[in-house]
């Protein structure tokens, strides 16, 4: 058997690839064929210690550099990522099964954007302030936290590795990153590129592992911050563990976001937005608008166009540039999605299209048809729980106040969207929706310039934008006395 994506070793620590075969085996499987493409080992406690010790050792000197000098290295990494976009995109496709049509425009490139943005703003974004106090004065400094841990999900392995690494490094921290056990490959390539760009060794370490490994990082006394991208149940565990030693945390968790289509919307744009917000990355996107509320008057037309466009989606070999929808990341995720589809049928939703396994693909791949349910009601399981697959639920509504209340009736609060040609209504509605990231007349666009993150059970903290720098640093305030001390004794 060929291991066609085998990295040089499982971990990248202190500027080099490191192996420890004592760790349990992690098989990297290409989701389109079920083929084992790499075999790695989970980090042993010794590997975890080595990674954290190397980060701890390297961080002070990095923090002492000027932000411009740090930024220069990050921008060089951005250039290298762009130069190698094709090979990194192919690796991302092998890691995740996402079609090359997507990875080539969305994955390494968004990672490069992140290094370019944070490399560029490091110098200006970390300034403090001067506070006059009438003779005396104070000033603030933004200082790094120290060793930060990033823990990734499997849907955007390279992007997540960059979205956490870039602001952490720009702010003067070191990072130890653990990718998902389902997608161990991409972060190693990012680590290698960062060091080629001139990053001093020890500042960006990657170790492999699963839910057993994560706690070794989260509980470690030398770690100052944990940033997790994952599910709500994992978020609760990680936040609770981090609270034990009062670590800083950023939680990028799941969602069940509402996407509201009013009757005055441009229907083709709304259908396009709903499809992007449910089928991109085979539906494995945390911010997806999986509850599509459509105003009753346009329901029939919306569903007609949605069905035609969904049935025209090209499903197949992810390495074929014509393919628009690839497999799920794993057999387990495929089974989970199929079980939700079965629940949708059993609970009385109307299956508009899809609902099974496509017949034009290898039976060994983890494929699911893009699926649309209509007549979904708020109580149905498929309207309440995060499916994380290509399953769109269309719900009917009549008026604005009703749809806002129903849109908010969820424990999640990651994202929300509104399609309408009435701009006043658009702003009024998003103002009342409980979510961290919202869109009007588009969906799921997350450029590095804008903050991204959730509210309610979808998490806290923000990635991207200047806000992310704040989450990877803290304020130090210095009061300067300019006269004699007035003591009452
Ligand atoms: P998951 O929660 O199963 O795993 C996420 C990561 O946490 C993995 O690396 C896993 O090994 C690690 N982990 C698991 N248990 C841990 C523990 N006790 N301590 C430390 N680490 C632990 O999530 P997943 O299945 O990989 O990803 C899908 C989920 O991620 C979905 O819920 C999705 O919505 C969410 N997600 C959120 C965002 C966002 O930015 N908000 C982005 C992508 C995915």
Image (cartoon, rainbow, N blue to C red):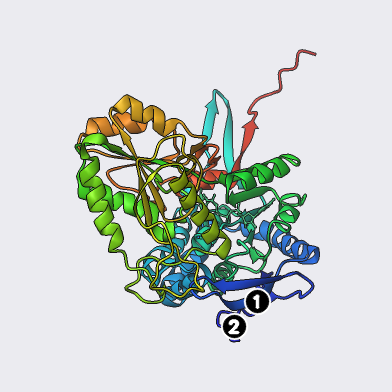
User: Does the closest atom of ligand 1 sit within 8 Å of the Cβ of label 1?
Assistant: no
- The image position of residue 472, as x and y in percent, is 58, 48
Q: Nearer the viewer, residue 460 or 300?
A: 300
Q: Nearer the viewer, residue 489 or 298?
A: 298
On residue 39, the disc is 1
SS for callout 2: loop
Q: Residue placed at 73% from the left, 60% from the top?
A: 52
SS for callout 1: strand
Q: Which quadrant of the view contains residue 482?
A: top right
- The image position of residue 404, as x and y in percent, is 36, 29
On residue 266, the disc is none
User: Does the closest atom of ligand 1 sit within 8 Å of the Cβ of label 2?
Assistant: no
Left or right: residue 225 compared with residue 154: right
Rendered position, 107 above or below 268: below
On residue 3, the disc is 2
Mark 2 vs mark 1, CA separation in Å: 8 Å
Sort mark 1 into few (<14), some (14-19) or many (20+) by Cα contacts within 10 Å: some
Rendered position, 72 above or below 372: below
- The extreme top residue here reads 488
CB atoms of marks 2 and 1 within 8 Å = yes
Q: Residue placed at 55% from the left, 83% from the top?
A: 4
Q: Nearer the viewer, residue 272 or 186?
A: 272
User: Could you tell me which quadrant the N terminus lies in?
Assistant: bottom right
**Mark 2 or 1 closer to N-term?**
2
- The image position of residue 183, as x and y in percent, is 57, 66
- The extreme bottom residue here reads 1
Q: Which quadrant of the view contains residue 190?
A: bottom right
């Amino acid at each position: 058997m060929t291991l066609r994506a085998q990295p040089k070793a499982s971990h990248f620590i202190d500027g080099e690839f490191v192996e420890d075969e004592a760790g349990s085996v992690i098989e990297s499987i290409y989701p389109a064929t079920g083929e084992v493409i790499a075999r790695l080992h989970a980090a042993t406690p010794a590997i975890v210690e080595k990674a954290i010790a190397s980060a701890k050792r390297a961080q002070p000197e990095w923090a002492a550099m000027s932000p411009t000098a740090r930024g220069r290295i990050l921008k060089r990494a951005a250039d290298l990522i762009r130069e190698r976009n094709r090979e990194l995109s192919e690796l991302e496709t092998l890691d995740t099964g996402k079609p090359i049509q997507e990875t080539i425009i969305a994955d390494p490139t968004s990672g490069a954007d992140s290094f370019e943005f944070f490399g560029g703003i490091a110098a200006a974004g970390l300034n403090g302030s001067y506070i006059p106090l009438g003779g005396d004065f104070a000033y603030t400094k933004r200082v790094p936290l120290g060793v930060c841990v990033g823990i990734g999900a499997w849907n955007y392995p390279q992007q997540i590795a960059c979205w956490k690494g870039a602001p952490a490094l720009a702010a003067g921290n070191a990072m130890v990153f653990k990718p998902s056990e389902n997608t161990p490959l991409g972060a190693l390539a990012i680590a290698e590129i960062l060091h080629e760009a001139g990053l001093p060794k020890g500042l960006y370490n990657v170790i492999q592992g699963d839910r057993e490994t994560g706690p070794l990082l989260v509980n470690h006394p030398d770690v100052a911050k944990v940033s997790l991208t994952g599910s709500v149940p994992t978020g609760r565990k990680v936040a609770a563990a981090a609270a034990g030693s009062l670590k800083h945390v950023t939680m990028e968790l799941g969602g069940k976001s509402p996407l509201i289509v009013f009757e005055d919307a441009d229907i083709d744009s709304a259908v396009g937005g709903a499809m992007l917000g449910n089928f991109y990355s085979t539906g494995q996107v945390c911010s997806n608008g999986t509850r599509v509320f459509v105003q009753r008057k346009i329901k029939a037309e919306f569903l007609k166009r949605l069905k035609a466009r969904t049935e025209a989606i090209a499903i197949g070999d992810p390495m074929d540039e014509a393919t628009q929808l690839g497999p799920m990341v794993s057999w387990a995720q495929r089974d989970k999605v199929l079980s939700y589809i079965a629940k949708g049928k059993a609970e009385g939703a109307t299956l508009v299209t899809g609902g099974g396994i496509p017949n034009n693909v290898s039976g060994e791949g983890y494929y699911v048809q893009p699926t649309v349910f209509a007549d979904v009601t708020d109580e149905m399981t498929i309207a309440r729980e995060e499916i994380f697959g290509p399953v769109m639920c269309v719900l009917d509504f009549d008026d604005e106040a009703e749809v806002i209340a129903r849109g908010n009736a969820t424990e999640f609060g990651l994202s929300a969207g509104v399609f309408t040609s009435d701009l006043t209504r658009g702003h009024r509605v998003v103002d009342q929706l409980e979510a961290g990231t919202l869109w009007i007349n588009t969906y799921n666009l997350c450029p590095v310039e804008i903050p991204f993150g959730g509210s309610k059970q979808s998490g806290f903290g923000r990635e991207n934008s200047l806000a992310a720098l704040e989450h990877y640093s803290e304020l130090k305030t210095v009061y300067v006395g300019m006269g004699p001390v007035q003591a009452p004794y």
